[in-house]
Image (cartoon, helix red, strand yellow):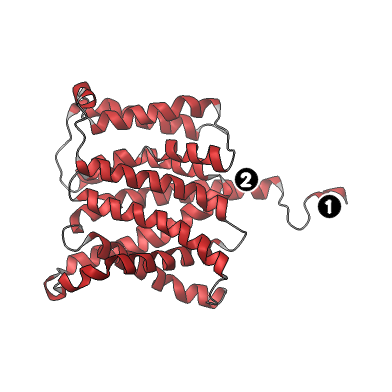
Amino acid sequence: MDKVLTYGEGHQSPSATDRRVQRSHLLMMIATALVATSFPVGAAITNGLDSLVLTFLRFALAALLLAPFVAWRYGLVIPRLQDLARYAVLSAFLVVFFWCMFAALRLTSALNTATIFALTPSITAAASAFLLREKLTGKARIALPLGVIGAVWVISRGDPTALTSLKFGLGDGIFLAGTIALGIYSTLVKFLHRGEPMVQMTFWTLTTGAIWLLLLSTSHWSDIEWSAVPVSIFAGIAYLAVFTTLVTFFVFQWSATIIGPTKVMLYTYLNPALVLIIGLVLGQELPPLAIYPGLLLILAATFILQSSK
């Protein structure tokens, strides 16, 4: 009877909790691989359309694809004003991140953006400590600085003088701003979650994001000659909407409530290596040897952090 009371309604047995954690980590591995593909795909299509229009189409298509399931499962009742405000705040940070990504990919490489993306765990950890009072483990205190050093190493191509003379490109700076926005967003998911189904939260985040982007991109639509836009651009948008937006949004938001935002963002340390591998598969040349120590530091940080309990 005591055990029944202990694990009654509203509580889960330790084994059920462990399964949810394991499932979350497995899904995060899949989502991380999908996110890595967004950098080369984004780089391939970013010159085909305005950044704001691209991001709007990505959000709008993902929301439209998710709408039938949400309508069937929960109904498409417009949330209360305070709930819409929560989703609008979340989506505002996402809009900043994705606009920065497309804008930055016009000016810098996919590997550079993926490497800057590896700074997200440190930004998330700082935001989580402030908003969620989340404390860092001993391993995290060692690994997070390693990841930052590794990321900076790759961005500077292993040249110390590039750091002292601040030889960072404009694209790198733009994407860094977007990465800060994403780190804050990751923490806000857990901070603003009120127990609603995660699919529902994902849908309204995408929808409010599409509204933000429609308002911001209005002046750009008249400049677009749609008949001249290659089919490959629309194919890239569809891929990003389904696999690196719809799927990854749900996985990231759901996992943030299970294993915490900092743990979720630790997977971003794998992105530089994954983007490098994808680039090699697509026939790109090997990057300079000077950046490999930085990549090794990033991978070491990943394994240290994911081995911590």
Q: Position of residue 126 (x, y in %)?
A: 48, 36
Q: Position of residue 117 (x, y in %)?
A: 34, 42
Q: Position of residue 130 (x, y in %)?
A: 54, 39
Is 295 above or below relative to 41? above
Would you name the residue on which mark 1 appears? 5
Look at 59% across and 50% down and name the residue there.
20
User: Does the rendering let one see residue 23?
Assistant: no
Residue 46 horizontal side relative to residue 211, left or right: left
Amino acid type, mark 1:
Leu
Residue 74 horizontal side relative to residue 167, left or right: right
161 or 6: nearer the viewer: 161
> Circle 2: is it few (<14), some (14-19), or many (20+) Cα within 10 Å?
few
Disc 1, SS: helix
Look at 19% across and 38% down and name the residue there.
169
Task: From the image, state whether disc 2 or disc 1 is nearer to you.
Answer: 1
Would you name the residue on which mark 2 appears? 18
